[in-house]
Image: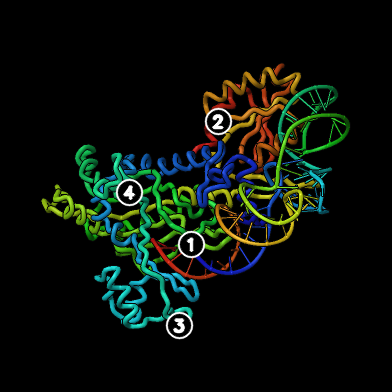
Amino acid sequence: MDKEISMEQMTNFCKNYGFIFQGSEIYGGLANTWDYGPLGSRLKNNIKDAWRKRFIQQRNNAYEIDADILMHPKVWEASGHVASFSDPLIDCKECKMRHRADNLINDFTSSSIADSMTKEEMINYIKENNIKCPNCNKSNFTDIREFNLMFQTYRGVTNDNKNVVYLRPENAQGEYVNFLNVQRSMRCKLPFSIGQIGKAFRNEITPGNFTFRTIEFEQMEYQTFCKKGEDMELYEYFKEYGKKFFIDLGIKEEDLRFHDHEKLAHYASAACDIEYKFPFGWGEINGTHNRTDFDLSAHQKYSSISQTYLDPDTNEKYIPYIIESTYGLDRTVLAILFSAYHVEKLENDEREVLKLHPFLSPYKVAVLPLVKKYHSEKAKEIYKKLSNCFMCSYDETASIGKRYRRADVIGTPFCITIDNETLNSNTVTLRFRDTMEQIVLNVDEVASYVEDKIKF
RNA sequence: GCAGGUGUAGUUUAAUGGUAGAACUCCAGCCUUCCAAGCUGAUAACGUGGGUCCGAUUCCCAUCACCUGCUCCA
């Protein structure tokens, strides 16, 4: 961006132009929920399509699925989320600092004995050993409260514990439990990939930065199943492939960086984020993980269904390794908005312009009659025709200059004006958003001209 | 979850213990033949709930939401 824009200004921008609205706004809002408006959902869907093109269409042996949000509860036991997503939290009554009880004990003893303790055992241990708050050095804690990051609900009409189901906290398990289904039905050989776009839910209390951290969020996930030994090469490959994807979407390379993890999640042997430089600092927009054979092994154990692959080349049977590359869709939308937002100084004026990749733009062409009473009939005719090919907008109010600006600020790459020449010789003036250059085209050439320019 | 800040039309804001004025935007009309022109008109706001008070947008309390910084998570 040429001009710094704060998170607050971006929030207002998104509201003003119909990209993103606060969730349940008329009721005062619900924390960390945001609704995509007409332009925001177009942008988001275009990003999904761009991802599909790069990750499914243009790659060999890659398949998209659409798994259910609700899955068998055992899935989350196998994945480790039931255990590791419920942290035993404890608050210091003196300084109000919140801690994890198991960490307090483990740090105190320099061991991992708390990992096998129950809640009561942990409370007692802290009391007996007079473990102090690391912040204020006093020992006056609340009870332990377990806070599970997974949203729980119940199937059936009774709130019986046996009927607990979870909203998925990640999409990945949908791909893993369908590994064999996809492999058989698509006759896949390793390595192959399963991608999925969908919503996931995490019941986090932590505040978000606009849509950066929300309780409901959408991911574009890509799981590549491979032979052990080929995993690290693929891992490195997908890190770079992901970065290139973001650059192709229009994010500047200097606003991106890799962040290798030292502390790893329970399922991963290697993890690296791609981060974007947001106003609040660097924030993760992609995560690439080497999940090894952890997930499929766990599902084999919990389901008693073999998750092995018979390698036709070597006749070996083994559980594949998985390289996961996850894209936070809402975060990608936000990063792209920040990247695209510009304020340009003109001679006596300035313009706000969203320099989106044309493929991502909500509208591809704005159709503008030069003078409403002379040209609007013809313009509507052309608008109707072009709308068969791509999203168009139509604007006949206020001056032509103002209408150009309206198109600029929402990222429409092309404007065509309908004037007397259109009526006489069937030509229109086509104007580029980025350079404000104009060319004259025959009406019948517009669609194919634009189609060519909006490719991803 | 902690600390601080903010909350008045879509946006930016003004004033006020006696229910609010503007600019921009948007809409309608006039004008206008290529980059936010002009004129006329219209719509539109005190986050929510309590309390004090004859009366609260204003003072107090609570709550909700957002922003900033921590913390946490990945």
> Mark number for residue A257?
1
Q: Give the mark nearest the N terminus, 4 or 2.
A: 4
Which chain contains the residue that carries disc 3?
Answer: A
Distance from disc 4 to disc 2, alpha carbons, whole Å, reads 38 Å
Distance from disc 4 to disc 3, alpha carbons, whole Å, reads 38 Å
Tell me if label 2 and label 1 are in contact, CB under 8 Å: no
Residue to which mark 4 is pinned: A166
| Tag 1 secondary structure | strand
Q: Give the mark nearest the N terminus, 2 or 1.
A: 1
Q: Is residue A22 left or right of residue B72?
A: right
- Foreground residue, A228 or A39? A39
Residue to which mark 3 is pinned: A137
Q: Give the mark nearest the N terminus, 1 or 4.
A: 4
Crowding around mark 2 (Cα neighbors within 10 Å: few <14, some 14 to 19, many 20+) is: some
| Tag 4 secondary structure | strand
Crowding around mark 3 (Cα neighbors within 10 Å: few <14, some 14 to 19, many 20+) is: few
- Foreground residue, B11 or B55? B55
Residue to which mark 2 is pinned: A391
Q: Give the mark nearest the N terminus, 2 or 3.
A: 3
The type of residue carrying mark 2 is: Met
